[in-house]
Amino acid sequence: MQVADKVFVVTGGGNGIGREVVLELLARGARVAAVDLRATSLEETARLAAAEPDQLSTHTVDVTDPGAVAALGPEVRSLHGQVDGLVNVAGIIQRFAPFLDLETAEIEKVLAVNFWGVVHLTREFLPHLVERTEASLVNVASMGAFVPVPGQAVYGASKAAVKLLTEALYAELRGTAVTVTAVYPGAIGTDIAANSGVGAPDGEGPEIKTTSPRDAGRQVVDGIEEGAYRVRIGRDATMLDRLSRLMPRRATDLVARRMQSLLDG
């Protein structure tokens, strides 16, 4: 799918990977409706894009609110006339803590953003995607969907749910004009902890090589144009994907040993 002259809705468009996906789509000639919870973050994305109003619209929306998402669909179609692609990037991590230390409200918030946000946006826009001659649905999961990380049990569970939902949508939409892509970022140099409102974990964790958000955004848009089934971003995500399928217990033990310091701190 060539993205030029197509219209994409991108959640999480105010920062990190989402912002870079917005900028990359615009650079390749697409029109974009950027969605984020924070208006100031969207303003910065718009400033960086320096795009014409008919190329980029910004929408301050809480993806966990079904009513707000239902109002977003008609708004985007009114501004852009159509929707050819949906890229669900918005996501948060949990507080770095063992499962038993988490409050119910913390668990529900992570699931609401990471899983239910994807569900709400997909239910709103998929009926319009299937009417296009070609369309794209992209859901960003995580390498945490392959292997659990100590202190991120609920985050990993939410992303595993996104993984399986996306694969099921692929199976259901075979034979239609909609390509379905799951994205699995590894460690990306974003401010996701601060944006999630949880802060960094206490103590020092292991040194981890990260992929830049810009490179991640480029790879996501490459995946859209290629109609990829999977996009793995970073050598860490690629390695854990392979290891988790070949030796799942060994993969879990490896990550648990390396990342245990996040909890020990």
Image: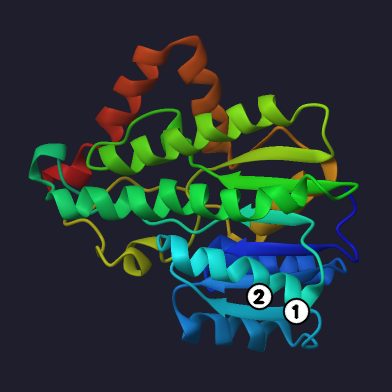
**Residue receiving disc 1:** 79
Whether residues under marks 2 and 1 lie with C-beta atoms below 8 angstroms apart, the answer is yes
**Residue receiving disc 2:** 75
Left or right of 241, for residue 182: right
The percent position of residue 63, horizontal first and vertical second, equals 46, 62
Give residue 25's quadrant in the image.
Answer: bottom right
Indicate the secondary structure of the residue bearing disc 2.
helix
What's the image's color scheme? rainbow
The percent position of residue 27, horizontal first and vertical second, equals 82, 71
The percent position of residue 212, horizontal first and vertical second, equals 58, 59
Indicate the secondary structure of the residue bearing disc 1.
helix
Which amino acid, by three-letter code, is at mark 1? Leu
Residue depicted at 77% across the width and 88% down the height: 53
For residue 177, above or below residue 190: above
Q: Is residue 56 visible?
A: yes
Q: How far separated are the C-alphas under marks 2 and 1?
A: 6 Å
In the rendered image, the residue lying farthest to the left is 101
Left or right of 150, for residue 80: right
The percent position of residue 201, horizontal first and vertical second, equals 22, 56
Residue depicted at 78% across the width and 44% down the height: 130
Which amino acid, by three-letter code, is at mark 2? Glu
In this rendering, the count of numbered labels is 2
